[in-house]
Amino acid sequence: MMNVCYPAKVSEDPAGGFCVQFIDLDEAFTEGDTFEEALFNAAEVLTLTLEGRLSEDMEVPEPSQGAKGVHYIAPDAKTQGVLLLRAARGDRSLADLARAMETSWPQAKRLEDPRHWPSLKTLDKAARVLGKRLVLSIE
């Protein structure tokens, strides 16, 4: 099972508030007046950073695992879905995925667009075609 939570260092700012820096994404950082606000802002910054990388066809690193002294933060559900599907697809082409799902290439491509909300039925079908199981959780 792949996890798309990214590790971030949260530090208290001597001037007040909290700073957050993602260790896998140099450009992803934020702050907040309270610890809770900093974590909320971090999830939004993470989502925007990953969406930007995906839309620009830039590399999206896998989250580091087992980092000490960090908080693991998840992007929004759409972005999680895209990253999980890409990882499950591996080297398989989108054309192969589309054929196996009995859909068009543009429909398969939309599954990897973080601005698109695929249905659970479609995500489940894609997961099954890739030999995986769709598992949901609410935190």
Image: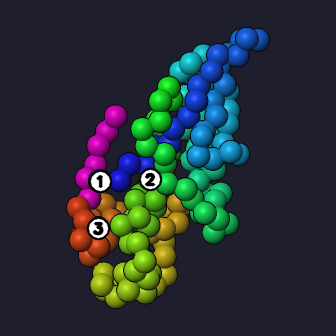
Q: Which disc, if any, is residue 80?
A: 2
What distance separates the C-alpha of mark 3 from that of mark 1? 12 Å
Q: Is residue 13 above or below residue 53?
A: above
Q: Is residue 136 magenta?
A: yes
- Which range of residues does the magenta coloring cover? 134-139
> Where the C terminus falls, by quadrant?
top left
> Residue 1 got which mark?
1
**Magenta stretch: residue 21 in it?**
no
Q: Residues within 10 Å of mark 1 (few under 14, many from 20)?
A: few
Q: Label 3, on which residue? A: 127
Pointer 3 or 1: first along the chain: 1
Hey, what amino acid is under mark 2? Gln
Q: Name which residue lies at 26% across and 59% down.
A: 134
Q: Nearer the viewer, mark 3 or mark 1?
A: 1
Determine the residue positioned at 47% across, 30% down. 68
Provide the secondary structure element on which disc 3 rests.
Answer: helix
Give the main secondary structure, helix, strand or loop, of the magenta stretch: loop
Which of the 4 quarters of the picture holds residue 22? top right
